[in-house]
Amino acid sequence: MISKEDLTLYVQRSLTDATVSVTDRTGTMDHFNIQVVSDMFKGKNLLDRHRMIYQALDEPMKDGRIHALEIQAKTTDET
């Protein structure tokens, strides 16, 4: 289990300008929908954006605190 706040902090450590919105999809605090808005995504394709988020969340993904993750990654121009 990981809190929405901790998940947000992991992302913001890597993507310092990120605005993060997290939804617990199942009520079990391990299946999440995450929306990340960051200008660090500019010039990056969707796969690279997702890789950036997965890299930021590497620790909780590996230790099982995050079981499933649905990602939306946009720049401020795309919101």
Image (cartoon, rainbow, N blue to C red):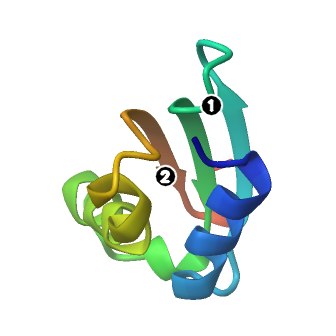
In the rendered view, tell whether residue 37 sits above or below residue 10. above
Q: Nearer the viewer, residue 41 or 25?
A: 25
Label 2 sits on what residue type?
Ala
On the image, the x and y values in percent for residue 31 come to 50, 27
In the rendered view, tell whether residue 38 sits above or below residue 13. above
* Residue at 32%, 72% in the rendered image: 55
Determine which residue is flagged by label 1: 29
* Residue at 43%, 43% in the rendered image: 66
For the N terminus, the quadrant is top right
On the image, the x and y values in percent for residue 11 come to 57, 70
The image's mark for residue 63 is none
Mark 1 burial class by Cα count in 10 Å: few <14, some 14-19, many 20+: some
- How far apart, in angstroms, are the residues tagged by discs 1 and 2? 21 Å
Q: Find the residue positioned furthest to the left.
A: 47
- Horizontally, residue 1 falls left or right of residue 76, namely left
Count of marks overlaid on the render: 2
Determine which residue is flagged by label 2: 73
* Residue at 63%, 58% in the rendered image: 7
Label 1 sits on what residue type?
Met
Q: Nearer the viewer, residue 76 or 36?
A: 36
In the rendered view, tell whether residue 39 sits above or below residue 23. below
- Quarter of image, res 25: top right
Q: Find the residue positioned furthest to the top.
A: 26
* Residue at 78%, 57% in the rendered image: 5
In the rendered view, tell whether residue 56 sits above or below residue 30. below
- Quarter of image, res 71: top left
- Horizontally, residue 23 falls left or right of residue 73, namely right
Q: Nearer the viewer, residue 16 or 57?
A: 57
